[in-house]
Image (tube, rainbow, N blue to C red):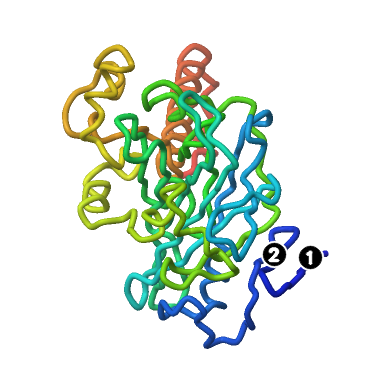
Amino acid sequence: MRLLFLAAAGCVIAASAFCQSNSQAPTLDADRDGLANAQENALLSRFEPQFQINAHDCSVRPAQFEPGLAIPKVITDNGTIYAQATPVTENRVELHYYHLWRSDCGEMGHLLDAEHVSALVSRGADGEWKALYWYAAAHENTVCDASQIARASTLNAEDAGPEIWISYGKHAAYLDKKLCSRGCGGDSCSDEIPLHSAALINLGEIGAPMNGALWVKSSQWPLEEKLSRSDFPPERTARIDQLPASDVAWANPDLRPVQAVLLGGNDALGGGATGFRATNTALVIANTHTSNALRKATANTGRALGKSYRGVLHFLNPEPSAPADSVVQPQ
């Protein structure tokens, strides 16, 4: 049973229900971005990622913050996910999912840690929404920036959110567990458990925060900048579109040579490969089409081997000739 508690200062929700202190009237647009609250909440719920966190993270779980305050104050570390839905065009919306932590308790740790994952979703001619791309932020705006971008189809996440791996202590997000050690080598995604979100809370927009999230503008963390920009500029999506459909790409590939040196050699650039794809590609995933092709190739090979085996048996042990009147004539 989902529980909803409303108060003058804000609201608290259990069991991943949406925190919405306003009416769900179809036309209500509390953050004044042109997209109704009900539509925002429906999209954010549908595409919420499946976060995998470390079972023994030193900051426990993403935190819930007290509404109505200008500075972020943690209520509890209960796994709350905050979210934002921003219309890009009439038929495209950018979704941000923020896992906000009491502290970054990794190397060079600090209080308050604002991290996120995002998606660009599009409405088709049939009215159905599908994700086009996913982005995972990892050490943004540092020399160790290992943020990634991928087509939603590569992650099998066109109709729902993908699995996201969160590193221990530093809370960098990865679209695949194998990428966790590919930044500057300081991340670990071991001992993972699924995060059962206590709540999914709509932050609204930076100029019109919802649900008492006044603390998004606090200078104590870079959350305001993250809410104010797109993770899918045209040059970034154009670059991923040039790569094979199986690739997860680095969002900021210009940093890869420096990171390779920090990791101890050029092998960090895609297993020693060179060229455009190696520099841009974070990981190659065997997608559904590849798997189907491999299964088909295996089946065809099996049939060919079986046919050859039967031919050899027939050559070694020929059957007696059939009587002339039993031979079936071609039609």
Q: Position of residue 15 (x, y in %)?
A: 74, 58
Q: Are marks 1 and 2 in contact (CB under 8 Å)?
A: yes
Q: Position of residue 270 (x, y in %)?
A: 29, 24
Q: Position of residue 241 (x, y in %)?
A: 25, 50
Residue 116 appears left or right of 90: right
Instruction: Give the quarter of the figure containing the N terminus.
Output: bottom right
User: Residue sitting at 44 percent across and 22 percent down?
Assistant: 186
Q: Nearer the viewer, residue 195 or 208?
A: 208
User: Residue sitting at 20 percent across and 34 percent down?
Assistant: 254
Q: Is residue 267 above or below residue 148?
A: above
Q: Secondary structure at mark 2?
A: loop
Q: Earlier in the sequence, mark 1 or mark 2?
A: 1
Residue 226 appears left or right of 164: left
Q: Nearer the viewer, residue 219 or 33?
A: 219
Q: Position of residue 284 (x, y in %)?
A: 36, 34
User: Residue sitting at 45 percent across and 46 percent down?
Assistant: 155
Q: Residue furthest left?
A: 275
On the image, numbered disc 1 is attached to which residue?
A: 2
Residue 171 appears left or right of 9: left
On the image, numbered disc 2 is attached to which residue?
A: 17
